Amino acid sequence: MRCLPQELPLGDAPLTGKQPVWDLPVRLVHWTLAGLVVFSWWSVHNHHTDWHIWSGIAILTLLIFRLLWGFVGSSTARWTGFIRGPRTIASYLRGGWYGIGHSPLGALSVIALFGAVGVQVGLGLIAEDEDGIYAGPLSRLVSIATSEKARDIHELWFNVILGLIVLHLGAIIFYRLRGKSLVAPMITGKAATDPRARPMRPGKWWIALICLAIAFALSRWVVAGAPPFGP
Amino acid sequence: MRIHLVAAAAVVSVAAASVAFAALPKDKALAIMHERHEGMEKIGDTNKLLRREFASSAPFAPAVKSGAATIAGLAKQASGWFPPGTGPEMGNTGAKAAIWQNQKDFQGKLVAFQQAAAAFNAAAASGNMDSAKARYIAMIDTCDACHKSYRSEMHH
């Protein structure tokens, strides 16, 4: 009974008008993350290492929030809602997939970007600059040699993120050329959807607030130097 | 006559000295740049050790004392680390050419660092770790203030 109005029969007239596909938290996380990645890159290359570190902490907060929202958020935000196996990906590539939210292939991109940025934040937290002026809040938990190694990898790892960003932008252009805008839905939250697709089930705003509070608390804990506030 | 000779000799030697100053021999310049690099690296490494001391609830006073003395000593030597002719035109260095274009500002920042390093050293020697920590942070700020304008990323 509950599924009835959600699955329109095949052959029915396509839904006119746009349907919600991305909730507000997903969109905010997306654009804030994009902005902070650019800001992190700019600030560290312009002698604003302090801003760079705070930008990294902000990204950490976003990642924690998004991780949690992926369990309790809207249907299109949930990890289980879009992570699919190779068979579904292959079927998608053959055109046999319909749905809203991340496509099975796009899901790989989400995981890769989320993971790569997560690794970058982790490295930054324990890294230390060459001159001993700036250090990530958790650098005191590791040896100087480890901090330096982390900084070197942190620098190199940016290229991995850059590669994924290029791939991400390439995919946007690819879909655009095939007549599908991915950017507009990420701004408005709405898109023309396949009538056979199950509509988005929105998350609750107060659950989003709880996730945000947890994300802030955990980030604050990291800023304080973690375990019992320091080594 | 003798006075003239002496005066002439003085003029000649001053001229020779200024020529030598303007054109530091390459091997001399490279030696200073090397000494500067090693010295700065040592200061940086000592900073890292000190940060870990101050991050703990009970900094180990002898380690703080020795670190502060190391930095204060190197800070004094830093007066001789930036003669003209030891900039990026001479070789691979983290020192920006701006150092020699804004001598007054640069020297002011260098002196600020030297004074802060001396103050940190005095605080560390007194054994008061709270005041040593405050002086350490103040000193790090002088490093940062100078590096923001005059240090470039150096790949070696």
Image: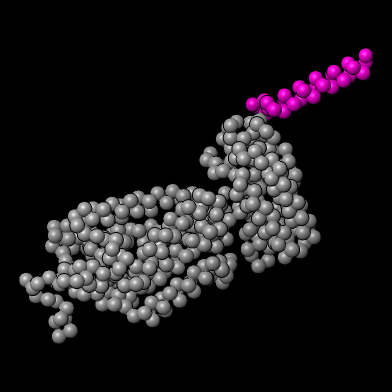
Which residue is rendered at x = 28% and y = 63% of the image?
Answer: A184
Query: Tell me, what colour scheme is on the image?
Result: one colour
Q: How many numbered marks does the figure carry?
A: 0
Image location of residue A104, percent across then percent down: 23, 62
Residue A120 seen from this side: no
Residue B6 position by quadrant: top right
Residue A24 percent location from the top left of the image? 34, 72
Q: Quadrant of the N terminus of chain A?
A: bottom left
Q: Is residue B146 left or right of residue A84?
A: right
Considering depth in this image, is B145 or A120 the residue closer to the camera? B145
Residue B4 falls within the magenta-colored stretch: yes
Q: Position of residue A174 (x, y in %)?
A: 23, 53
Outermost residue, front direction?
A17
Quadrant of the image containing the C terminus of chain A = bottom right
Question: Is B152 situated above or below B17?
Answer: below
Kindly indicate the quadrant of the structure image that contains residue A16.
bottom left
Q: Residue A180: x, y in percent?
A: 21, 59
Q: Please state if B128 lies on the left or on the right of B92 as rendered.
A: right
User: Is residue A39 in view from this perspective?
Assistant: yes
Residue A229 forms part of the magenta stretch? no
Outermost residue, bottom side = A1
Which residue sits furthest left? A11
- For image coordinates 55% across by 41% down, the residue present is B154
**In-image side of A147 versus A25 (left or right):** right
In the image, which residues are magenta?
B1-28
Relative to A86, does residue A152 appear above or below in the rendering? above
Q: Residue at x 71, y 43 (%)?
A: B104
Q: In this view of the protein, which residue sits in the foreground, A124 or B52? A: A124
Q: Is residue B103 left or right of residue B152?
A: right
